[in-house]
Image (cartoon, helix red, strand yellow):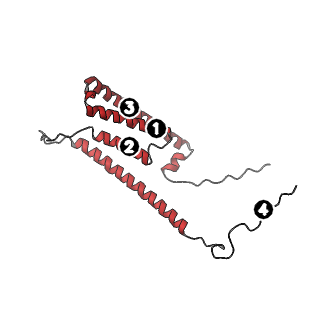
Amino acid sequence: MLSQPVRASRPVGTGLRAALRSRSGVARGARGIARWSAITAGVAIGVFHLYLFWDRLAAGDLLDPSIALRWLSAAGLVLALVLLRRLRIPLTTGRKACVVWLLVVLLHAYGRGAPILPQAPPDGFDASVVFVLPSTFAVIGLGLLCALDARRRLAAVATVARIVDTPAPCRTSNGWRHAGTTRGPPAISF
């Protein structure tokens, strides 16, 4: 009977990444749900923006220079996202993707201009709160995510620096012998 080779045990991870990289049926199902949810959301956002573009085009608002410039910059941002995707740069992490997504946020934040002299609301409720609160929470959340990522990266760099700078006690570091091979390679005889 032939013996089976011993398989190297893979380290068992914890957290979301390890769960999503797992080969279990639950993880595959979760990946499928996440993928189709992202596709559905992307298609819905695309259809919504096509509707907005058609509405602006039909109303003749695209002749306004500020609106035309915003739509041209939006096309440039879509082109940047496609380029990042073709270069296999992640669209959710990294500096380049973060810059593009911040430009998308700025493009959408500029979309609703506040009047110079706001009128007092007739019923006592200011409708701009509906737009201000979600954007404020989004900016705070994005800032917290960036701070968390920076803290994690700085901790990793500090750990690596502490490991590299610490001399390992061994015979060569204590001056017992010179580092290198102890004997020459075996001679090949024919």
For the C terminus, the image quarter is bottom right
Residue at mark 3? 46
Task: Mark 3 or mark 1: name the one nearer the start of the chain.
Answer: 3
| Residue 61 vertical position relative to residue 162 in the rendered view, above or below | above
Residue at mark 1? 83
Residue at mark 4? 185
Q: Nearer the viewer, mark 2 or mark 1?
A: 1
The kind of secondary structure element at disc 4 is loop
The kind of secondary structure element at disc 3 is helix
Task: Mark 4 or mark 2: name the one nearer the start of the chain.
Answer: 2
Residue at mark 2? 101
How many marks the image carries: the answer is 4
Left or right for 127, reference 140: left
Dot 2 crowding, Cα within 10 Å, few <14, some 14–19, many 20+:
some
The kind of secondary structure element at disc 1 is helix
Quarter residue 61 falls in: top left
Task: Mark 3 or mark 2: name the one nearer the start of the chain.
Answer: 3
| Residue 141 vertical position relative to residue 42 in the rendered view, above or below | below
- The answer for how far apart the CA atoms under marks 3 and 2 are is 16 Å
- The answer for how far apart the CA atoms under marks 4 and 3 are is 65 Å
- The answer for how far apart the CA atoms under marks 3 and 1 are is 18 Å
- The answer for how far apart the CA atoms under marks 1 and 4 are is 51 Å
- The answer for how far apart the CA atoms under marks 4 and 2 are is 56 Å
Left or right for 110, reference 21: left
Residue occupying image coordinates x 54% and y 54%: 13
Dot 4 crowding, Cα within 10 Å, few <14, some 14–19, many 20+:
few
Q: Say what amino acid the circle numbered 1 marks.
A: Leu
